[in-house]
Image (spheres, rainbow, N blue to C red):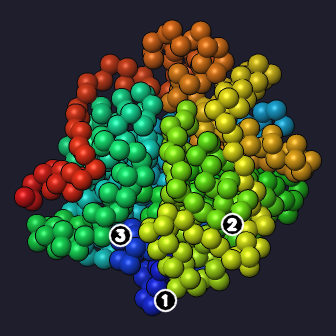
Amino acid sequence: MKEILYKSTRSKSGTLKASEAILKGLAEDGGLFVPTEIPLLDISIKELAKMSYQQVAYEVMKLYFTDFTEEELKNCINKAYDEKFDTPQIAPLAEVDGAYYLELFHGKTIAFKDMALSILPHLLTTSAKKNHVKNEIVILTATSGDTGKAAMAGFADVEGTRIIVFYPEGGVSPIQEKQMVTQKGNNTYVVAIKGNFDQAQSGVKSIFGNKELAKEMDEKGFQFSSANSINIGRLVPQVAYYVYAYAKLYAEGKISEGQKINVVVPTGNFGNILAAYYAKNMGLPIAKLICASNENKVLFDFFRTGEYDKNREFILTTSPSMDILISSNLERLIYKIAGEDAEKNKELMESLATEGKYEITPEMREELSDFYGNYATEEETAEIIREIYEKTGYIMDTHTAVAASVYQKYRKETQDDAVTVIASTASPFKFTRSVMKSINPDYDKLSDFELVDELSKIGTVRVPDAIEEIRNAEIRHNNLCKVEEMEAIVKKFLEIE
Ligand SMILES: *Cc1c(COP(=O)(O)O)cnc(C)c1O
């Protein structure tokens, strides 16, 4: 098998092995790690169609994590995709109203972040072992709601690790917040910040970039790593479910071998849709990559105009995990369409940091022809939840609804009726109030858990364990800080004052 190495999107020199890139998370120059090339699938769809989720995941990940032994990688996969998921299929497809919803929410925290975050701790601890790391690994994460909980669930009580999560106060759903502040595990820390998600993310990035702090940490036996979607150890496991979905469609006779499908992804940080783009580049027959945004529609404007401009009002929506103005993972795409020109990419990213915007060249725009961007307003998001429920009985969450609405617009605009997979990124139980209010505004009178029970009744779906668990759980975390205090609070937790 061909060895794949990783390099930064912001410098020409230096490559790392997969395990080293996973450990580091972010490159020292502020860039993201990308594979020196995207490997091609070396197995037929016919063969993949016979495989379990775990087996497909191995076929995909082995091509990227080439310094892991077969045993190491299979170990990680088997520890990640087990009974924590409430279905042996791990990522089942639901056929609803002419599209296939790829349900990525059957893990421990009922959102798609589980797909990658249940394996990342194992990839990370395996990488630490392979590289003779003695320090304790401190995971630092900014979350718009789902990553934080999924990361904590993944890392809780994993030996040799600690995890610190920052989330925007008032910027996550009540259920999301309750899930986080009730998190168990002696190595978990949760802090609300007085700011929005982008400020939390910038704060984390600046702590990562602080060389003095890194030195201080090292002296005390700690080192940082990231569980954010910029870690290559999160991106690669996400490629697997697109391959799995395609193989399943083939196995069920819904498509013929080689038939192209479209993929619709409700997008925030651009990690999930980038994984679909990688899958396409590996040879998976995907035609259009449909990027769905909520009212924070920076990406829609970018695909339309070639200018990325985050200088705008930050809107709090009912799909909070997509309330993002700086889509970090887009940098990997920019690098690729710039012809893997690190200098060019760096220039654009510096412009983003200083001016809050950048513009790509016409040549780069041509490389984006496989992408289609659009967005759904709050009203449209609520409308499609009600519409699909009334038509089919299927209840989707607000993020998935953004995708469903954008898909409807795409169909209207293009008449393209290719088989389509819509990434369904969260269980409706995670955003119960918004979902139920969409179906009937009167539901707003009910309490959070009355809504949960009502949703279960009208949707005829069992209340997920993740929700049952927090019904009566005690609050274990009660921390609030200003953006400028993030570093100090990290030091306080680690007792390195
Ligand atoms: C994180 C998240 C998204 C956005 O995914 P990105 O990879 O950040 O684009 C969409 N929906 C849900 C429910 C999420 O948790």
Looking at the image, tell me whether mark 2 or mark 3 is earlier in sequence order: 3
Task: Point out residue 467 in the picture as x, y percentages from the top left corner.
Answer: 44, 26
Query: Would residue 440 be seen by someone viewing this image from the given angle?
Result: yes
Amino acid type shown at disc 1:
Lys
Amino acid type shown at disc 3:
Leu
Residue ID for mark 1: 12
Q: Dot 3: within a 10 Å radius of its alpha carbon, few (fewer than 14), some, or many (20 or more) residues? A: many
Mark 2–mark 3 CB contact (< 8 Å) = no
Amino acid type shown at disc 2:
Gly
Looking at the rendered image, the quarter that the C terminus falls into is bottom left
Question: Which residue is nearer to you in this view: 491 or 247?
Answer: 491
Q: Residue at x 25, y 70 (%)?
A: 210
Element marked by disc 1: loop
Left or right placement of residue 242 versus residue 99 in this view: left
Residue ID for mark 3: 23
Mark 2–mark 1 CB contact (< 8 Å) = no
Residue 369, label in figure: none
Task: State how far apart marks 2 and 3 are (Cα).
Answer: 33 Å
Element marked by disc 2: loop
Residue ID for mark 2: 306
Query: Would residue 284 be seen by someone viewing this image from the given angle?
Result: no
